[in-house]
Image: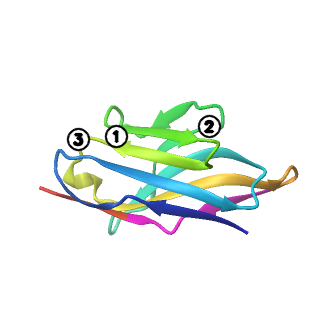
């Protein structure tokens, strides 16, 4: 059984910073790309940032230059450092990853979500 558990959300003023973490646990052989998504009230879930197993990154245009995704493969953990936060960054943030529990069995997992609220 594999789980993704996020932490680090909270309430912050505009211009502030937060760091989200997402740790994978359970029977893990390897992890493919790890992603952060977010969903604001009344809006569809959107991809915020991606990091491949090799460390290549990609960002949504709305967060480019403000957010940084990183991962610690030894800890099976992905991070999202968020700087210069804006009220429009308010959302529930979810991590997502393709995880191999054996060399032949891969499944996509989601965390439970963590709330980020940015006040103006």
81 with respect to 90 (left or right): right
Q: Quadrant of residue 108?
A: bottom right
Q: Which residue has dot 1 on it?
A: 63
Image mark for residue 84: 3
| Badge 3 or badge 2: first in the primary sequence | 2
Q: Residue at x 31, y 36 (%)?
A: 66
> x%, y% of residue 80?
42, 46
* Of 70 and 96, the residue lying toward us: 70
Q: What's the colour scheme?
A: rainbow
Image mark for residue 52: 2
75 with respect to 45 (left or right): right
Distance Cα–Cα, label 3 vs label 1: 10 Å
Is 95 one of the magenta-colored residues?
Answer: no
Dot 1 surroundings within 10 Å: few (below 14), some, or many (20 or more)?
some
Q: Quadrant of residue 25?
A: bottom right
Query: Which quadrant is the N terminus positioned in?
Result: bottom right
> x%, y% of residue 2?
69, 65
Task: Indicate the secondary structure of the residue bearing disc 3.
Answer: loop
> x%, y% of residue 11?
23, 62
> Which span is picked out in magenta?
106-114
């Amino acid at each position: 059984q594999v789980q993704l558990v996020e932490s680090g959300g909270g309430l912050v003023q505009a211009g502030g910073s937060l760091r989200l973490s997402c740790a994978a646990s359970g029977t893990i052989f390897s992890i493919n790309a790890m992603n952060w998504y977010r969903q604001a009230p009344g809006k569809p879930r959107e991809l915020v940032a991606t990091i491949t197993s090799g460390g290549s990154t990609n960002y949504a245009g709305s967060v480019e230059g403000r957010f940084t995704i990183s991962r610690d493969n030894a800890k099976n953990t992905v991070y999202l450092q968020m700087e210069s936060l804006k009220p429009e960054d308010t959302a529930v943030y979810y991590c997502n990853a393709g995880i191999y529990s054996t060399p032949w069995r891969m499944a996509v997992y989601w965390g439970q979500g963590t709330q980020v609220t940015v006040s103006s």
